[in-house]
Amino acid sequence: GAVVSQHPSWVICKSGTSVKIECRSLDFQATTMFWYRQFPKQSLMLMATSNEGSKATYEQGVEKDKFLINHASLTLSTLTVTSAHPEDSSFYICSARAGQNYNEQFFGPGTRLTVL
Amino acid sequence: AQSVTQPDIHITVSEGASLELRCNYSYGATPYLFWYVQSPGQGLQLLLKYFSGDTLVQGIKGFEAEFKRSQSSFNLRKPSVHWSDAAEYFCAVGATNAGKSTFGDGTTLTVKP
């Protein structure tokens, strides 16, 4: 099956610093990747849709200057949390879709971000 | 706009008992429907999906779900629950072209010995 990895699996940083999270599709080319945020015991909230080679589409209420998304290749998307604050602490999950007409998403294992 | 409702926040069943997790959706066209399972601190694993065809779909780990258009439901079932099934379960509906999915709030399953 299709495998999606995320790195790092967890990260602790100081308030005001920036953190980059990588999402990779290991055995397929992902035309579209999605970034989700999940608070404890809550559902996944879609943050943005990332298409290779183009700007990400952000969901309403998500600050694009705060959460920078880059999808430079068909196997890699990155999410950078800029000037992180404690309220940005969360579980970030990416998913990847293999093709335009293929609706199934393959999820990464998630990244736990803790901002002190 | 698409939406998903999982009416049960928390369900407790005894090991070996049957299980049904409810999911109701709202979507203007034929939906793509999914059930995922999430263990603590982990990503999501796809249990099964419905795109078209047979309304009773079989998934991994002995799970099945039935799509009922008249009830806008896609309930997940398992005839005999194992302790390892304890986890968070999410129902999701996907748009046919956009690819992105909307998730329900999840149901936490606890399995009693």
Image: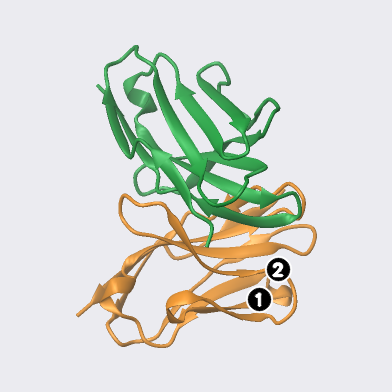
Chain colours: A green, B orange
Residue toward you, A69 or A75: A75
Nearer the N terminus, badge 2 or badge 1? 2
Seen at 65% across and 28% down, the residue is A56
Seen at 45% across and 56% down, the residue is B44
Label placed on residue B51: 2
Residue B56 locus on image (x, y percent): 63, 82
* The C terminus of chain B, quarter of image: bottom left
Residue toward you, B73 or A78: A78
Label placed on residue A33: none
Residue A77 locus on image (x, y percent): 55, 33
Q: Tag 1's secondary structure?
A: strand
Q: Which amino acid type is shown beneath numbered disc 2?
A: Phe
- Kindly identify which chain the residue marked by label 2 belongs to: B
Against A34, residue B14 (above or below) is below
Q: Which amino acid type is shown beneath numbered disc 1?
A: Phe
- Kindly identify which chain the residue marked by label 1 belongs to: B
Residue B22 locus on image (x, y percent): 52, 71
Residue A87 locus on image (x, y percent): 36, 25
Q: Is residue B98 left or right of residue B106?
A: right
Residue farthest along the left direction in this orientation: B113
The answer for how far apart the CA atoms under marks 2 and 1 are is 10 Å
Quadrant of residue A64 within the rendered picture? top right
Both labels 2 and 1 in a single chain: yes
Dot 1 corresponds to which residue?
B67
